[in-house]
Amino acid sequence: MTAQTHVPSVFSRAGAVSALTLAAVGGSLLVPGAASEAQAVPHAATALQVAASKKGSPYKYGASGPRRFDCSGLTVYSYKKAGKKLPRTAQQQYNKTRHISAAGRKKGDLVFFHSGSSVYHVGIYAGGGKIWHSPKSGDVVRLERIWSRSVWYGRVG
């Protein structure tokens, strides 16, 4: 048998197409959702760790730590500990960040909940479709699945 007539089973028609597709995109795996789980840049990773460390801290309107937080207070506090300054309100934070797509989101990016053009809530993306946030009066800082499609994403520079 010559090399030209013997085709190993791994190069079946579907396998060859997949291998060619993989080669054409420079060896990157194109898996749905993979971009959303990409690792955060260093300051974003630190901010995410800080937010997670505040699990169970009570919500208090207007508070920005270290023991109580409202939603934007948690993001201000977390990013300050990571060496980045954010404005105080969720809307101001949205206006200050670099806007990114859901497909381009990374751990540590900010997730902005909006109604029309008004931002009313913010959290820190933790991966897996979840955020760390300080939800509302009577609640505590916690990890929660993103519950709405009305979200925008922003990256702190």
Image: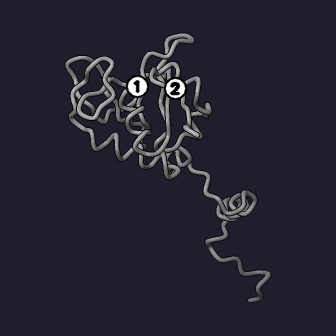
| Of residues 28 and 95, the one drawn nearer to the viewer in this rendering | 95
x, y percentage for residue 63? 31, 23
**Element at label 1:** helix
Location of mark 2 (residue) = 93
Image quarter hosting the N terminus: bottom right
* Count of number-bearing discs: 2
What amino acid type is highlighted by mark number 1?
Answer: Ser
Q: Quadrant of residue 62?
A: top left
Location of mark 1 (residue) = 72
Q: Quadrant of residue 73?
A: top left
x, y percentage for residue 100? 61, 34
**Element at label 2:** helix
Dot placed on the residue nearer the N-terminal end, 1 or 2: 1
- Asked if the residue under mark 2 is in contact with the one under mark 1, i.e. CB atoms within 8 Å, the reply is yes
Q: Residue at x 55, y 32 (%)?
A: 154
Q: Residue at x 28, y 44 (%)?
A: 53
What amino acid type is highlighted by mark number 2?
Answer: Gln
Near mark 2 (Cα within 10 A), the count class, few <14, some 14-19 or many ≥20, is: many
Q: Is 139 displayed left or right of 16 in the figure?
A: left
